Image: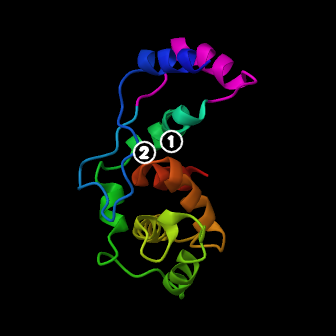
């Protein structure tokens, strides 16, 4: 089963694996890259996903990137390549309105407290902060709701930061 998944992923094409959780986002204009599923391979993908054995653990993050990029790709392509980088900078743009920045800060350390990446000094905290503030700036009418930190945090475990942001945007 794992061999079938590996063959499928090689047919789809090369793409970057999830980067190590780091404190900085990708530089401006350097969008995280993911392959997209060509229409002629969509049926094979459906068969693999529906297999009772599911997605092999060691390939899960690659498959998630592939599926989410298919889901958000066209929407994301409609924006400037540096869009996420521009709006995620804490020092750029207006602070989140109505105390949302304070609520985000309170929720950061409540996010997956037993996960090593989400400890106070964990690398994922910086990414989560940027992602949530970027989301509030992108969608001010929605703003921030308690619980967004867990959705975004879960996405960050499996996806590159920018793709996790676009995943939040399209939900």
* Residue 36 covered by magenta stretch: yes
Tell me the element at label 2.
helix
Q: Quadrant of residue 71?
A: top right
Q: Which residues are magenta?
A: 35-55
Q: Residue at x 33, y 76 (%)?
A: 93
Mark 2 to mark 1: distance in Å? 6 Å
**Residue at the right extreme, as displayed:** 52
Residue 1: where, in percent of width, then height?
A: 62, 17
The answer, for residue 169, to whether it is visible in the render is no
Label 2: how many Cα within 10 Å (few below 14, some 14–19, many 20+): some
* Residue 31 covered by magenta stretch: no
Residue 28: where, in percent of width, then height?
A: 23, 55
Q: Residue at x 45, y 71 (%)?
A: 129
The answer, for residue 54, to whether it is visible in the render is yes
Q: Residue at x 51, y 65 (%)?
A: 116
The correct choice, above or below, for 61 with respect to 4 in the image is below
The correct choice, above or below, for 93 with respect to 43 in the image is below
Tell me the element at label 1.
helix
Contact? badges 2 and 1 (CB < 8 Å): yes
- Horizontally, residue 142 falls left or right of residue 10, namely right
Q: Which mark is residue 11?
A: none
The correct choice, above or below, for 144 with respect to 24 in the image is below
Q: Quadrant of residue 141?
A: bottom right
Q: Which mark is residue 76?
A: 2
Residue 69: where, in percent of width, then height?
A: 48, 38
Return the residue nearer the eye: 111 or 69. 111
Residue 75: where, in percent of width, then height?
A: 47, 43
Task: Please name the residue that numbered disc 1 is placed on.
Answer: 72
């Amino acid at each position: 089963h794992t061999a079938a998944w590996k063959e499928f992923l090689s047919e789809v094409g090369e793409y970057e694996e999830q980067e190590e959780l780091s404190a900085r986002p990708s530089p401006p204009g350097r969008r995280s890259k993911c392959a997209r599923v060509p229409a002629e391979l969509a049926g094979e993908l459906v068969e693999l996903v529906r297999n009772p054995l599911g997605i092999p653990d060691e390939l899960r993050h690659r498959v998630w990137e592939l599926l989410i990029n298919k889901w958000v790709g066209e929407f994301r392509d409609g924006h400037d390549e540096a869009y996420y980088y521009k709006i995620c900078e804490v020092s750029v743009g207006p602070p989140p309105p109505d105390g949302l920045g304070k609520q985000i800060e309170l929720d950061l350390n409540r996010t997956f407290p037993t996960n090593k990446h989400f400890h106070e000094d964990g690398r994922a905290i910086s990414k989560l902060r940027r992602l949530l503030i970027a989301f509030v700036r992108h969608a001010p009418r929605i703003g921030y709701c308690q619980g967004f930190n867990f959705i975004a945090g879960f996405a960050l475990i499996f996806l590159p930061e920018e793709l996790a942001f676009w995943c939040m945007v399209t939900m």
